[in-house]
Amino acid sequence: MQHESRQQPDEEEVFGPSKSELKRQATALQKLGEDLVALDPELLDTLPIGEALTEAVRLARRIKAHGGRRRQMQYIGKLMRDEDADAIRAALERVDPTSPRTVRVQHQCETWRGRLIEEGDDAVTAFVHDYPHADVQALRQRLRMLKREREKNAPPRHFRELFRELRDIIEQAPE
């Protein structure tokens, strides 16, 4: 007769998450809801959230009484359970100008823009090596237009456009 080895299931498999863990999750969702309430109203519509949550956030902005606002924030936390919190966090990080990811992307864009202007085609080749999804032709054309802009002392439109193009390319790159 062979003995079958039985593995003991983890406690979480049997009992589920602990009460403390559930409270931590609920608090994290409520904190995310507070971030939504503090967000610029125009940016709220760009986030991947449902209509009920959007309305609850708008209502929370109008409530001035401490107790009423606290209850509304708890309600927002409850609504957050039905939302994709990770997608909302990622979207908030993209629109928050102070997030570490946004700051890092800004610095990369500034560095690459400087290199592209100074080094020209060599820098374009290096950039495309790092970001293969970049449109080489569009970058080179933007650099030519920027050079003409500087020769004519025109307003720095292409300088800003180059930055925006670089930001779009860098943000689309897998991390």
Image (cartoon, helix red, strand yellow):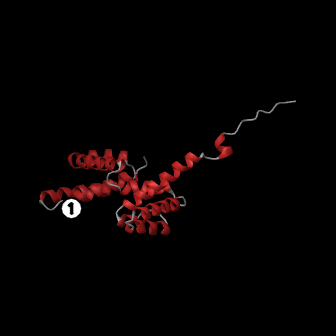
Can you give x and y, in whole percent of width and height, for residue 101 in the image?
A: 36, 48
Is residue 48 visible from the viewing direction of this image? no
Dot 1, crowdedness within 10 Å: few (<14), some or many (≥20)? Answer: few
Instruction: Give the number of callouts.
Output: 1
- Give the labeled residue for mark 1: 157
Looking at the image, the residue that sits furthest to the right is 1
- Left or right: residue 24 versus residue 175 is right
Residue under the image location 18 percent in, 55 percent down = 147
Q: Secondary structure at mark 1?
A: helix
For residue 3, which quarter of the picture? top right
**For residue 15, above or below residue 142:** above
- Left or right: residue 156 versus residue 85 is left
**Quadrant in the picture for the N terminus:** top right
Residue closer to the observer: 91 or 126:
91
Is residue 171 visible from the viewing direction of this image? yes
For residue 62, which quarter of the picture? bottom left
Residue under the image location 49 percent in, 52 percent down = 27
Residue closer to the observer: 12 or 175:
12
Residue closer to the observer: 66 or 50:
66
Residue under the image location 30 percent in, 47 percent down = 108
As shown in the figure, which amino acid type bears the numbered disc 1? Arg
Can you give x and y, in whole percent of width and height, for residue 131 in the image?
A: 37, 48
Can you give x and y, in whole percent of width and height, for residue 29 in the image?
A: 49, 55
Residue closer to the observer: 133 or 172:
172
Can you give x and y, in whole percent of width and height, for residue 67 in the image?
A: 43, 62
